[in-house]
Image (cartoon, grey):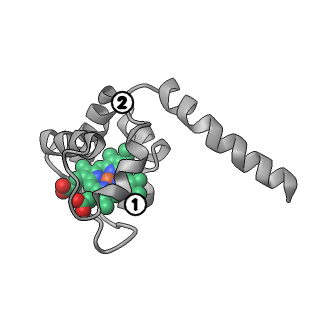
Amino acid sequence: MKLTKSIAIAMVLALPQLGTAVAADGATLFKEKTCLTCHGKDGKTPLLPIYPKIAGQNAAYALQQMKDIKSGARANGQSAAMKGIMHLVTDEEMAALADYVATMAP
Ligand code: HEC
C-alpha cells in the first residue's frame, strides 16, 4: 500500500521529465501529456460528452486553440479543465500535437 503510493508519487514527479526527453513525437506526447484522458486515445471518445472530439481537426486551428487555452485567451465553456495541464506543454510540443491530431481519423 505504502509502496504503491510512493510509486504513484514518483511517477507523477517523473512525468514532466519524460515529456522533455521525447521532444516532438505527437503520438507519444498525446499519451504523456494526458491528452488522451480527456479527448480519448482516438481523439473522438471524450471523457465527458461536453468535451470536444478533436480527431482530424485542422492543425493550424488546433495549435491556436491550445495556445489560447494555455494563455487564457480562450476561457470559454470547459477550457479551464484543460488549462491545468498546459503549463507542461511547450510551443514545440503543441505544434507536434496539432500535427498529430490532424492525422487522426475523424
Ligand atoms: C482535463 C481534460 C483535458 C485535457 C487533459 C486536455 N484537454 Fe483539450 N480540451 C478539453 C476541453 C474541455 C476542451 C474544450 C474547452 C471549451 O469548452 O472551450 C478542450 C479543447 C481542446 C482543443 C480545441 C478543440 C476545438 O474544437 O476547439 C484542442 C485542439 C485540444 N483540446 C487538444 C488537447 C491536447 C493536444 C491535449 C494534451 C496536451 C489536451 N487537449 C488535453 C479538455 C482537456
Residue 34, given in percent of the width and then of the height, sits at 46, 50
User: Assess mark 1: CB under 8 A from ligand 1?
Assistant: yes
Which residue bears the numbered disc 2? Answer: 90
Residue 4, given in percent of the width and then of the height, sits at 80, 54
Instruction: Locate the N terminus by quadrant.
Output: bottom right
Q: Splitting the image into 4 quarters, where does residue 71 fall? A: top left
User: Residue 90 or 79: which is nearer the viewer?
Assistant: 79
Q: Pointer 1: residues within 10 angstroms few (<14), some, or many (20+)? A: some
- Could you tell me which residue is drawn at 21 percent across and 43 percent down? 68
Q: Say which amino acid is labelled 2.
A: Thr
Which residue bears the numbered disc 1? Answer: 38
Left or right relative to 1: residue 15: left
- Marks 1/2: CA distance? 19 Å
Above or below, comparing residue 18 to residue 50 in the picture: above
* Res 87 visible: yes
Q: Outermost residue toward the right? A: 2
Q: Outermost residue toward the bottom? A: 49
User: Mark 2 falls on what kind of element?
Assistant: loop
Left or right relative to 53: residue 10: right
Left or right relative to 85: residue 6: right
Q: Say which amino acid is labelled 1.
A: Cys
- Could you tell me which residue is drawn at 57 percent across and 38 percent down? 15
Q: Which disc is residue 101 wearing?
A: none
- Could you tell me which residue is drawn at 34 percent across and 67 percent down? 45
Instruction: Locate the C terminus by quadrant.
Output: bottom left
User: Mark 1 falls on what kind of element?
Assistant: helix
